[in-house]
Amino acid sequence: MDSARDGIFAGDDPFEIARTWMSEAARTEPTDPNAMALATVDPEGMPNVRVVLLKEIEADAVVFYTNYDSAKGRELIASGKAAINLHWKTLGRQVRMRGPVVKEDGPQADAYYRSRAVGSRIGAWASEQSRPLASRAALMERVETLGAELGDDPARPSFWGGFRLCPLEIEFWADGEFRLHDRFRWSRPSADTGWKIQRLNP
Ligand SMILES: Cc1cc2nc3c(=O)[nH]c(=O)nc-3n(C[C@H](O)[C@H](O)[C@H](O)COP(=O)(O)O)c2cc1C
């Protein structure tokens, strides 16, 4: 089969293709086109997965935000690796990426935090994400106390910020008739080398 990439798979920059697919999904998905499954492993090698929002597709990486002390935060910091999967049912497409992750806890994280609604900013302070919670009322009490303490322009907590995934592998997948889907895998041994592109069997 011809391995030429044309149509939606065309281009020399996988991040540009991902951005184009995301903007198409933004027009067709009813909610959260940037919702993605984020996979991690715990120290025993047990996989873990949950949905987070993809916030930035950069020139050579993607960024999402979370609590560094959450289960995922601790797993990402310990392993230094992650995999993500964006699935758009309305387009019949998915994008997978995996590779090393590093914290984004500088000015970019501050700016993103500042762009959020004050309620969400207080929420980030109030939630000891992934740890046991006695009751919903206890959480709401914390929200109220911290809201009064922090005022209407709270600074980003040091335990909350971004992670930047710099993929060594990206796969673009599109639904095909009779499950004969199209798949192209872009891979590179390190972030400073060029991409190898292969068409894969469905
Ligand atoms: C649509 C959707 C978007 C979400 N976005 C985020 C997010 O951007 N960051 C985040 O920390 N949790 C987000 N969550 C909650 C996570 O799925 C998860 O419950 C939480 O982060 C705790 O995960 P953990 O215990 O594995 O760390 C989102 C959940 C859904 C369903």
Image (tube, rainbow, N blue to C red):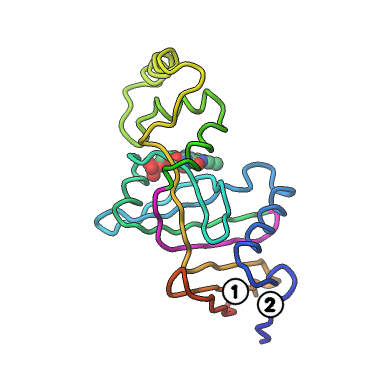
- Work out whether mark 2 precedes mark 1 in sequence or the reverse, and give the earlier one: 2
Total label count? 2
Q: Residues within 10 Å of mark 1 (few under 14, many from 20)?
A: many
Dominant secondary structure of the residues highlighted in magenta in the image:
strand
Classify 122 as above or below 22.
above
Classify 97 as above or below 198.
above
Q: Helix, strand, or loop for circle 1?
A: strand
Identified by mark 2, the residue type is: Arg
Identity of the residue furthest to the front in this view = 107
Look at mark 2 in the image and give the residue it sits on: 5
Q: Residue at x 45, y 47 (%)?
A: 50
Q: Residues within 10 Å of mark 2 (few under 14, many from 20)?
A: some
- Residues rendered magenta in the picture: 90-103
Q: Helix, strand, or loop for circle 2?
A: loop
Q: Is residue 80 left or right of residue 195?
A: left
Q: Which disc, if any, is residue 184?
A: 1
The residue closer to the viewer here, 61 or 88, is 61
Is residue 68 a member of the stretch shown in magenta?
no
Is residue 98 a member of the stretch shown in magenta?
yes
The residue closer to the viewer here, 124 or 140, is 124
| Residues marked 2 and 1 touching at CB (< 8 Å) | yes
Q: Position of residue 131 (x, y in %)?
A: 31, 34
Task: Classify mark 1 as within 8 Å of ligand 1 or not, answering yes or no.
Answer: no
Q: Which disc, if any, is residue 28?
A: none
The residue closer to the viewer here, 106 or 12, is 106
Identified by mark 1, the residue type is: Phe
Q: Residue at x 39, y 38 (%)?
A: 67
Q: Position of residue 179 (x, y in %)?
A: 64, 71
